[in-house]
Image (cartoon, rainbow, N blue to C red):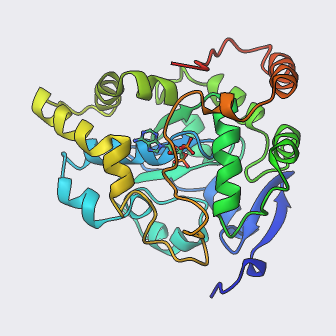
Amino acid sequence: NITTKTDFQEFLHNGIRFVSPIHSVEQLDWANEYKVLQDDVFIITYPKSGTTWMQQVASLILGNNDIDSVKNKSVYERAPWVEDCLFQRRLDSQTEPQLLTTHLNYQMSPNALKHNVGKVIYVARNPKDVIVSSYYFHIYSQFLKTPENFEQFLKQFVEGNVLYGPWFDHVRDWYSHKDEPNMLFVTFEEMFKDVRGVIEKVANFLGKQLDGKSVDSIISCCTFKSMKENPATNYQWVSRTIFDHNRGTFLRKGTVGDWKNHFLVAQNEWFDSICKERMADIPVKFYWDI
Ligand code: A3P
């Protein structure tokens, strides 16, 4: 029943920012206790890190390369968000393994995943491109406050006062579990450089055999161009009360290194120093450019 931007209300849960009526405390707690099935597959990302891209890849692999499904069923129906109030009823009655998505941090994610039940594909992206993508997403989304300017948004992001909380903690916590047997860690930049390699890695992780022809066909459905033109992946079907289609597109630029067009030299140096400090204890390396 959302009609205007003011129907969305931000709130904090466990110190992390969420927005109603997309989220609720009840739904978040339900997601944390979600009864994961052994063959459930979770795509886990910090927002704007390549979620949709991996939803497309994984749903094609699991759906045996069913091209019609990627045209006729939106990505969020193919891989629903476990913390989204829209999906609780549907997921509650599931007895078949599902492809699911979450942006939740490690602590708030379904606990079963931490006990080797279900599989996790975590996609991370270099934080400077996440910030730029997220900045435009805040302009496009009706449920997020439009930033005053890039400088203001950069500060807000670094402070973690954004939906789903601080990027640093999200990536650090998930990365530190990347060697668990039920987890695969990939990066947006890896997908950009070698999508075939990532598709094969994901298929292998999911125990699916793909011949060269199937991989070719999956690749053709996962290019930026084909996903941008496909209403089932570009969020064109989503109502204007959620996304203002006059102010942007969900698939925006799809590159590595767009941050260079947005960060001033001083902002870049400042962010590098923060990143060094906040990520000091983990060896994760990002490609800033390809
Ligand atoms: P940009 O805003 O930099 O273009 P998410 O799905 O997690 O919200 O991430 C969205 C980002 O992934 C957007 O980044 C979008 O363009 C990019 N993306 C989605 N599909 C892509 C693809 N097939 N190739 C390259 N980038 C893609």
Residue in view at x 19 percent, y 46 percent = 65
Quick one: 92 or 84, which is closer to the camera? Answer: 84
The answer to whether any part of residue 41 appears in the image is: no
Quick one: 159 or 140, which is closer to the camera? Answer: 140
Would you say 131 lies left or right of 229 here?
A: right
Quick one: 77 or 263, which is closer to the camera? Answer: 263
Would you say 285 lies left or right of 280 here?
A: left
Can you say whether 38 is above or below 280 in the image? below
Q: Quadrant of residue 128?
A: top right
Residue in view at x 65 percent, y 64 percent = 141
Quick one: 6 or 103, which is closer to the camera? Answer: 6
Would you say 211 lies left or right of 81 here?
A: left
Would you say 128 lies left or right of 115 here?
A: right
Residue in view at x 55 percent, y 42 percent = 44
Can you say whether 94 is above or below 147 in the image? below
Residue 102: percent from the left, percent from the top?
A: 57, 50
The answer to whether any part of residue 131 appears in the image is: yes
Quadrant of the drawing holding the N terminus: bottom right
Residue 137: percent from the left, percent from the top?
A: 64, 54
Q: Quadrant of residue 8?
A: bottom right
Residue 191: percent from the left, percent from the top?
A: 42, 28
Residue 229: percent from the left, percent from the top?
A: 34, 56
Can you say whether 220 is above or below 70 in the image? above
Q: Quadrant of residue 194?
A: top left
